[in-house]
Amino acid sequence: MTSTRHKWADRVEISPYKTERQCSRCEMVMVSRHEFDGGRELHWKEFWRDCDRLDNGTGTPPCDARLEKANG
Ligand SMILES: [Zn+2]
């Protein structure tokens, strides 16, 4: 099995509590979230593509490199 690693672009700061990086191979967006909840500091990551959330708390979904395939 071949697994392609994501190729993350530079971070884009959406807000002080949210940054995004997009994979140039498959267009997946990794969202880093940061919030305070009742004095606790929370960090988590979400993975999105085509307006769908891809992860279910099990870590980074695999890269399908669909853009590279589309380009031959
Ligand atoms: Zn990718």
Image (spheres, rainbow, N blue to C red):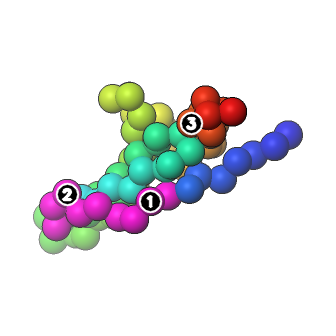
Tag 3 secondary structure: helix
Q: Earlier in the sequence, mark 2 or mark 3?
A: 2
**Horizontal and vertical percent for residue 69?**
66, 33
Which quarter of the figure is the N terminus placed in? top right
Q: Residue furthest front?
A: 72
Q: Which residues are magenta?
A: 8-16
- Can residue 54 be found in the magenta stretch? no
Residue sitting nearer the eye, 61 or 43: 61
**Horizontal and vertical percent for residue 70?**
61, 29
Q: Is residue 35 left or right of residue 53?
A: left
CA separation in Å, label 2 and label 3: 24 Å
Q: Earlier in the sequence, mark 3 or mark 1?
A: 1
Q: Mark 1 — residue?
A: 9
Q: Is residue 47 left or right of residue 17?
A: right
Q: Mark 3 — residue?
A: 67
Residue sitting nearer the eye, 8 or 45: 8
Tag 1 secondary structure: loop
Amino acid found under the numbered disc labelled 1: Ala
Q: Mark 2 — residue?
A: 14
Quarter-wise, where is residue 52 in the image? top left
Residue sitting nearer the eye, 64 or 59: 64
37 over 55 or under it: above or below: below
- Can residue 9 be found in the magenta stretch? yes
